[in-house]
Amino acid sequence: MLKLSSFENMNISENLKKSLSLMKFTEPTEIQEKAIPVVLSGKDVIIRSKTGSGKTAAYLLPVMNAIETMKGKNIKAIIVLPTRELALQTYRVATRFGKPSNIKSTMVYGGASISRQIDELPGSDIVVGTPGRILDLHNQGYLKLDHVKYLVLDEADLMLDMGFIDDIKKIISYTSEDRQTILLSATLPSEVKTMAKNFMKSPEFVSAGGEEAIPESIQHLYTMSEKFDKFSTLMSYIHNYDSRKAIVFVKTQRSGDLLNLILSRSGFNNILIHGGMKQHARERSINDFRHMDAGILVATNVAARGLDIPNITDIINFDAPDSTETYAHRVGRSGRMGKNGRAMTIFDADQKSLIQSIQRRNKIKMEKIDVNLETEYTDINYGHLIAQFRDNEETAREPDYHSRPRRPSQGRDRRTPSRRGNESRSRRNTGNYHKRDY
């Protein structure tokens, strides 16, 4: 295959090249270099690539290149994604790519006003959305799929894991037989292969970066901790390893609420996202964290797949993932587009076998580190607090997810609340997280 040293050498329109230039994209990634010519050829294609490899542009650019020359007011492409956050992220990229050529993209997803989405559909060239809302709009007669020329199934394995298989089959059945189908998947389980066999026409397989799903630029660390020492372990790591912009993963929504509350009261600049939050709150969390120079995003697995947030220095598994696949998807939020990243996991004593499984399955080496516990936080018994929190969850106040400045400066206040509240004492800032005032 011809090596393409820059987007200028690709067979795409001048409008798209202008968009790429404005977005400071000059050289294609490996998956873009391999996939774009195949999609341009009109063949059905299965794209498998590492997370953070630039696969969204690998299908958007050739699809939009074709749409530029297409006439008519029908919807020309449908891009199906499993979550609202991923749909929003893809929609934003499509909007920026399509601006010079006036290609209109519209986003549709559940949890938002369907009437507003109906109003935005006329004149759309591309619809980006989640399976349920796409079907709702089709069934109500507002979204015609029979003239769609390009069907993109992004994060196909995740959509099947989330139970969307029947919805996907229905969407496919409503589209034209002469469509081009583009399927993207981080893994290729049997269900994905079966779907490709049944609904794609002799698809060409494109892969980049080898079999492992985790970027090689990520350093993998772990430590052991008793449950009552976990918060102190987290604080020690953040301080001693100069963790600047981190996503901290927890297992449950309530654990996220609790950790977010403790971090807030300890003076950190932190944000929360989980599936129990309303859609507008989740979108605000992602948008705010995206624009932060330093801070912490406390997240459940809702943020573990596909989201592209710039300059993540650390992924911290406060609660260890329950599978090797979840580990890969979590840590893939760091080390994107070839940048260096770091992943640190806190394991319980009874999870030693999981450490070996993660290393073997993901073909990585995890380095054990000894963390000197921060004495300032050793009086916070996380295990006791979370048990108490769950006992009282019915009467617990709804946490304030957004009580923070929008664009933080550098520096954080690591004093305990009582010390921080004494204005007569000199202020002490260490680390990189923004200080709050209480």
Image (spheres, rainbow, N blue to C red):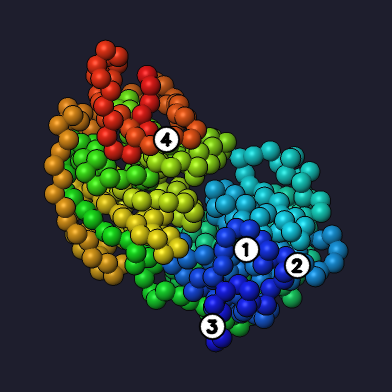
Name the residue carrying label 2.
67
Q: Marks 1 and 3: in contact by CB < 8 Å?
A: no
**Residue type beneath disc 4:** Ser
- Name the spot of residue 326 as percent of width and height, x first: 36, 57
Give the residue pinned by disc 1.
Answer: 20
The residue shown at (37%, 33%) is 434
Rate crowding at label 3 as few (under 14), some (14 to 19) or many (20 or more) other CA atoms within 10 Å.
Answer: few
Query: SS for tag 4?
Result: loop
Could you say which disc has been placed on residue 409 in the image? 4
Horizontal side of 386 relative to 277 (left or right) equals left
Q: Residue furthest front?
A: 426
User: Mark 4 or mark 3, which has the lower sequence index?
Assistant: 3
Contact between labelled residues 1 and 4, with CB atoms less than 8 Å apart: no
Which of the two residues, 319 or 174, is positioned nearer the viewer here?
319
Label annotation for residue 3: 3
Amino acid identity at mark 3: Lys
Q: How far apart are labels 3 and 1 at the CA level?
A: 19 Å
Vertical side of 28 occupied by 162: above or below:
above
In the rendering, at what x and y percent does residue 328 appear? Answer: 36, 60
Q: Is residue 78 visible?
A: no
* Dot 4 crowding, Cα within 10 Å, few <14, some 14–19, many 20+: some
Q: Residue at x 57, y 36 (%)?
A: 280
On the image, which quarter does residue 270 sit in?
A: top left
Which corner quadrant of the image does residue 373 belong to? Answer: top left
